[in-house]
Structure formats: C-alpha cells, structure tokens
Image (cartoon, coloured by chain):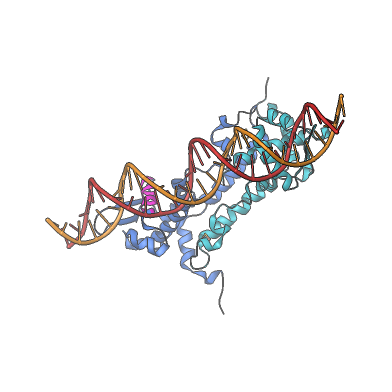
Chain colours: A blue, B cyan, C orange, D red
Amino acid sequence: MRLTRAGEYAIRCLLYLSMHRDRGIIGRKEIAEAMDIPAQFLGKVAQQLARAGIIAIRQGAQGGYELVTRPEELTLLSVVEAIDGEIFLNDCIHRPESCDRQCICSVHLVWEKARTQLRETLAGTTLARLAEEEAQGCAKRSPGP
Amino acid sequence: MRLTRAGEYAIRCLLYLSMHRDRGIIGRKEIAEAMDIPAQFLGKVAQQLARAGIIAIRQGAQGGYELVTRPEELTLLSVVEAIDGEIFLNDCIHRPESCDRQCICSVHLVWEKARTQLRETLAGTTLARLAEEEAQGCAKRSPGP
DNA sequence: GTATATAGGATCAATCAAGTCCGATTAATC
DNA sequence: GATTAATCGGACTTGATTGATCCTATATAC
Ligand code: FES
Ligand code: FES
C-alpha cells in the first residue's frame, strides 16, 4: 500500500493547519503555495478531509480551511485512511472470498499481523507531534556548529 | 503497497514447492491447478522468481519448476520484493527528490519506521514455517469435534 | 451587487495490474 | 532425428487507478 499523492498532500495540508492553528481559517491558496500542492488538487483532497470531519470548509470571500479536530487527537492513520481508504496490505484480508482457498491459509496470519502493526504505528503518531517536530526545524536532524 | 496479485501467486507457488520439496521438479500445470493460479500468468511470475534465484526452471518435456533456495532461508520479504520490487510505503523515501521540502520533514521518520517494521515482519517469516503450518491444515484454526 | 473563493462534476493523460496470445526455444522420448 | 511436451519471452489487451485540470455553480464578505 503505497501512500498516494493525495494522502501526502493531505498530511502536508493538515501539518500546516496544525502549525497555524491560532490563525483559524486559512485560504487554500496560501496552504497550496506554502506546502507545494497543486491548488485545484488540494480542493479535492480538502473535500475528502471535510467529509471525514477533520477540517471545516468555508466558502466565499475570505474562505478557506480550518482544523476541526484537535491536532493532539488527529492521527496519521485517520488522515491516510480518510483519503486512501482503509489500509489493506493484502487483498484477501479485504475481501476474503478473493482467495477461496480451503479455509485460512497460513500466510493470511502474517499479513494480518503486518497490517495491524502498520496501522498501529500510524495511529501512534499525532499531527500535534509532527507539527511540533516540524517547528523545531532541521537543526535537530542536522545540527550546525 | 498492496500485495499484488502476482505476489500472491508467487507465495502460493513457493508454498506448494516447499510442501513438495522431495519431489524435485514440478510441472507448471500441476502447481497452477493445485494453487488456483492462471497457468500462463504463473509463467510470468516464475520467470521473475527464477531471475531472483529463488527457483530453477527446466524447459522442455517433463519441465517445470524447482526450489533452489532452502525454504528455511526463504523469507516472505524476499518473495514479495522479488516480484513487486522493494517495499516503499512512501514515495518520498523511494526518491527523496520527489518531495523537495526543506530537509527531511517529520513525517518522513514515521514512514521510515513503518516501512522497517513491515519489512522486518515479512523477513521474519520463512516459507518453511508457512509450509509447515499449512500442512497442519485448518484443524488448528477451526478445531473439529 | 460585486469581487472573492470554494464546491463539485466532468474530463483527461499516463500509468499500472492482471491477464492472454503466440511464435521461438529447449529438452525428453521414441 | 522427428515428434512431442513444456516453458520462454515479448507483444498486446482491458480495466482500474492516479494525478491532475477545467468549468460552472454557489456561497460569503464588503
Ligand atoms: S486465506 Fe488470506 S491470505 Fe490466503
Ligand atoms: S521529506 Fe520524506 S516524507 Fe517529507
């Protein structure tokens, strides 16, 4: 399951919103430029995020997007799955009838474990923490003199 | 990265070969029928497995496929990556230039962790173990009277 | 009411997934 | 050596998905 472009943009967008939460509604254009996202495409992504209840959209002049979920409670998993749908590494786990082998093959269990692990890792990361780390900048990872 | 159909077939094929290792070369048709794989497609998959050094292919009459790697040393990861290529959950990790954001964004680290975890899980499963579990049948998972 | 912005549907090109077809090649057997 | 069995390997097909872009409608601030 490769994170799709739309998912990547969603994360960037929410990261930006998280880092500027105090500013309330922020225009699509600003976000798009700051985070290097095609503005039109961001529109589509935002619609999905809104449907998932993660952001609120305000139309018209001075419109834009606003975070509706607290960044501390917004996990990477919810973001990714809001955009790309629930994560299934293995098709058989998604629709068991796709592999109508005797009952459940031994491989199944491995994929199930892998999937759970992956989802837990993503669920364990909040946008708040990402925003915080991001705010600290690159210094942390490439310390200067 | 959703496990592709080809990957699924590769696993099934190797599972079959592992369970019948004592028989040496086994015809494509037999494998295809037993494991419910389109025979032609199995041909393609087998070629990739051969290129990866996992099986040997014998052409001509009485030809077929033979396991060349010991099932104890053949991991699910090598199989999957032999078919679908190295696993990258996130495009940016694959080609860092794709997201030329300042340096390395905080999200990056999470995906890296997720990817490592996933690969380790798959690397920790050998075909030998899968074959063994498979041989025990469904009894284990749905015990009868 | 006008300027500003997003909504939402349609469309599009490129890519990929999952097969299928078929002539070439290779090996066993008679 | 000819026949037959079986895979190789490249071309092709079909359908879905990705990653956008365009355009009209609609909502809001002023
Ligand atoms: S039954 Fe689910 S992977 Fe085979
Ligand atoms: S730099 Fe790799 S995910 Fe952003």
| Residue at 51 percent of width and 59 percent of height | B107
Q: Which of the 4 quarters of the picture holds residue B9?
A: top right
Q: Which of the 4 quarters of the picture holds residue A11?
A: bottom left
Front residue of A6 and B128: A6
Please report the bounds of the magenta region as a residue range. Answer: A41-51
Instruction: Give how far across and how far down residue A115 sits, in percent.
Output: 58, 44
The answer to whether residue B10 is seen in the rendering is: no
| Residue at 56 percent of width and 69 percent of height | A141
Q: How many marks?
A: 0
Assign the magenta stretch its main secondary structure.
helix
Q: Name the outermost residue toward the bottom.
A: A145
Quadrant of the drawing holding the C terminus of chain B = top right
Instruction: Give how far across and how far down residue A98 sits, in percent.
Output: 57, 31
| Residue at 71 percent of width and 32 percent of height | B134
The answer to whether residue B15 is seen in the rendering is: yes
Membership of A35 in magenta stretch: no
Please, is residue A56 above or below residue B32 in the view? below
Please, is residue B80 above or below residue A62 in the view? above
